[in-house]
Image (cartoon, rainbow, N blue to C red):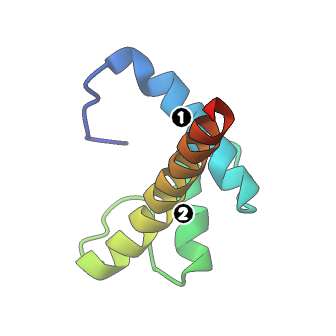
Amino acid sequence: MTKNKLLIPEARKGLTQFKEQVMSKRGYHTKSESELKYEVAKDLAVPLTKGDNGELTSKQAGQVGGQIGGSMVQEMIKMAKNNLASKD
């Protein structure tokens, strides 16, 4: 369960859909958003499990979050560039 708060709470559904879309392009197909981080962790050989993950290092946690968040940021940059290019 995510603990971060959105500035606009109504945006959560759109962000979730965007995350699923971006990660689907990267080959991750999960039944739910909550399963995505476990699939990414498995691919990165990070021992993320449901429940207590107190033994994870911050580097390991960052690898998983970075893979997901970084992919989203890359896609947003690509979308912005395309948007700017179409205005020329």
Res. 34 in view: yes
Secondary structure found at label 1: helix
Q: Position of residue 6 (x, y in %)?
A: 29, 29
Query: Residue type at mark 2?
Result: Tyr
Query: Where is mark 2, residue-wise?
Result: 38
Task: Name the side, left or right, on which 71 lies relative to 63.
Answer: right
Query: Residue type at mark 1?
Result: Thr
Give the spatial CA distance, label 1 vs label 2. Answer: 16 Å
Along the polypeptide, which appears first: circle 1 or circle 2? 1
Question: Is 7 drawn above or below residue 66 in the view shown?
Answer: above
Question: Is 34 drawn above or below residue 49 in the view shown?
Answer: above
Residue pictured at 59% horizontal, 51% vertical: 78
Which quadrant: the N terminus?
top left
Of residues 46 and 71, which is closer to you in this image? 71
Q: Quadrant of residue 63?
A: bottom left
Q: Position of residue 49 (x, y in %)?
A: 45, 67
Q: Residues within 10 Å of mark 1 (few under 14, many from 20)?
A: few
Q: Position of residue 54 (x, y in %)?
A: 24, 72
Foreground tag (1 vs 2): 1
Residue pictured at 24% horizontal, 76% vertical: 58
Question: Is 65 drawn above or below residue 85 in the view shown?
Answer: below
